[in-house]
């Protein structure tokens, strides 16, 4: 295997790894004779193990590309214990400088060793040939075709979605998704009766949109946002979380998306989530981060008119109220959101009198002091206290400014 990688490009090795893992999953799911192909791996792995062992014995440890513990673990077991192990190893070794070194090492081999290596390469090539490794685009097409099949059992539908979810991570693949008809079919799955299918589809959309204005635009044009906002209110926690993930990825740094979000009353959804104490805390965390993000985007682009949402006192109070949460992580995220919101145009007095921000900050100060004293999470508590202090300074500065120049 290592030789094959030495003679393959780095990108190909990584792509091959992905393709192989999906292919293997498919092969097993399709009931192909997996033991036959794993057997093949075992035998090549073993030969390789022998080769390495011999090289070690001869003191030629330069044959090993990298002497860290992780590599040895694979070989100590007498080869790769699994397909995954091999793939991990392949990815971990796709380092150009190491490949170069290895190529030099090959030049130093004796004719016998070279011959052995040559056979190794051939075995690998045959293996690849056997697997007929499909390209990412082909794999995406297969998954998309599966999704189009309305009589596909849910198990297979979920598997296709899972594959697509991995495949869309590289930006080039994400950009291909729409061309292959993938976006339309995935968005359609948001209406599937099964919660798992909807959840997996939201995850794909989120991943494909993340930091990708091209796909953001496509998904917005296909009108998926309204549905995602509905899903964020789902009684199924995972569905709500993945929907919020997708919404955040879709409208992040995207003003068109944000306008649509407000037009679809997305802010009401957020407000309902933040103010409902029986809602799962992970959903609240995602929502408050979305608020922080939206406010930050607004701050960075002061020329845009501020959405009314940011001035809604009830909404602001629901964010401030989270500072009293029992979960330090949620408190920190809420602090971060408050910090951004304070820098927008809402009057400081609203935060003070309607939201009770000064009291909330003081209560938090005492709580954090206690945590530091009790040495519970004290490093983290100190960090949060730093952020809290910063919020307090911004708040006091805003109060002073507002009293000096009342509006
Ligand atoms: C799978 O492969 C193994 C090993 O080559 C063989 O013994 C077995 O009969 C095969 N099973 C099927 C269903 O083909
Ligand atoms: C749809 O899925 C069913 C069940 O897996 C399968 O029998 C059928 O061949 C598939 N249809 C197409 C067009 O792929
Ligand atoms: C609050 O959330 C719980 C759990 O999701 C839900 O059952 C309840 O209807 C929500 N309450 C309101 C007022 O939305
Ligand atoms: C900020 O707003 C202006 C005017 O609406 C717009 O042209 C610009 O692209 C925006 N900046 C970002 C980072 O979106
Ligand atoms: C501090 O940690 C201990 C043990 O982890 C826990 O029992 C206790 O409730 C914690 N105190 C606070 C204030 O969180």
Image: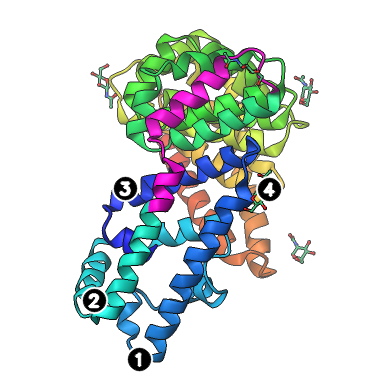
Label 1: element kind: loop
- Separation of residues labelled 1 and 3 (CA atoms): 32 Å
Expressed as whole percent of the image width and height from the top left, the position of residue 302 reads: 30, 24
Residue range highlighted in magenta: 126-153
- Separation of residues labelled 1 and 2 (CA atoms): 14 Å
Residue to which mark 1 is pinned: 59
10 Å crowding of disc 1: few (<14), some (14-19), many (20+): few
Q: Are marks 2 and 3 in contact (CB under 8 Å)?
A: no
Tell me the residue at 41%/32% (across/down). 210
Q: Quadrant of residue 333?
A: top right
Earlier-in-chain disc, 1 versus 2:
1
Earlier-in-chain disc, 4 versus 1:
1
Earlier-in-chain disc, 1 versus 3:
3
- Separation of residues labelled 4 and 1 (CA atoms): 55 Å
Residue to which mark 4 is pinned: 327
Label 4: element kind: loop
Label 3: element kind: helix
Residue to which mark 2 is pinned: 105
Expressed as whole percent of the image width and height from the top left, the position of residue 24 reads: 55, 44
Q: Are marks 3 and 4 in contact (CB under 8 Å)?
A: no
Residue to which mark 3 is pinned: 12
10 Å crowding of disc 4: few (<14), some (14-19), many (20+): few
């Amino acid at each position: 295997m290592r030789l094959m990688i030495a003679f393959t490009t780095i990108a190909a090795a990584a792509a091959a790894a992905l393709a192989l893992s999906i292919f293997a999953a498919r092969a097993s799911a399709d009931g192909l004779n997996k033991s036959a192909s794993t057997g093949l791996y075992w035998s090549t792995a073993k030969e390789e193990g022998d080769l390495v062992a011999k090289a070690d014995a001869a003191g030629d440890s330069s044959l090993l590309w990298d002497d860290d513990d992780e590599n040895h673990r694979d070989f100590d077991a007498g080869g790769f214990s699994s397909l995954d192990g091999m793939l991990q190893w392949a990815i971990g070794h796709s380092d150009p400088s190491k490949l170069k070194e290895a190529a030099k090492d090959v030049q130093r081999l004796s004719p016998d060793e070279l011959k052995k290596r040559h056979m190794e390469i051939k075995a690998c090539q045959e293996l690849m040939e056997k697997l007929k490794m499909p390209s990412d685009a082909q794999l995406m097409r297969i998954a998309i075709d599966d999704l189009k099949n309305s009589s596909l059992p849910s198990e297979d539908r979920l598997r296709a979605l899972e594959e697509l979810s991995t495949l869309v991570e590289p930006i080039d693949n994400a950009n291909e998704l729409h061309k292959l008809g993938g976006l339309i079919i995935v968005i359609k799955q948001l209406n599937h009766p099964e919660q798992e299918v909807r959840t997996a589809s939201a995850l794909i959309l989120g991943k494909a949109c993340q930091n990708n204005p091209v796909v953001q635009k496509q998904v917005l044009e296909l009108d998926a946002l309204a549905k995602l906002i509905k899903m964020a209110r789902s009684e199924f926690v995972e569905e709500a979380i993945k929907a919020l993930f997708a919404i955040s990825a879709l409208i992040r740094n995207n003003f068109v998306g944000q306008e649509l979000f407000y037009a679809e009353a997305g802010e009401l959804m957020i407000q309902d989530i933040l103010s409902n104490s029986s809602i799962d805390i992970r959903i609240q965390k995602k929502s408050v981060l979305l608020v922080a993000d939206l406010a930050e985007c607004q701050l960075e682009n002061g020329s845009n008119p501020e959405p009314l949402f940011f001035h809604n006192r009830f909404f602001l109070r629901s964010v401030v109220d989270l500072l009293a949460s029992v979960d330090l992580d949620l408190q920190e995220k809420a602090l971060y959101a408050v910090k951004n919101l304070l820098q927008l145009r809402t009057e400081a007095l609203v935060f003070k009198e309607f939201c009770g921000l000064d009291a909330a900050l003081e209560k938090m100060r005492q709580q954090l002091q206690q945590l530091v004293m009790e040495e519970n999470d004290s490093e983290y508590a100190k960090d949060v206290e730093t952020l809290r202090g910063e919020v307090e300074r911004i708040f006091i500065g805003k109060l002073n400014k507002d009293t000096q120049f009342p509006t």
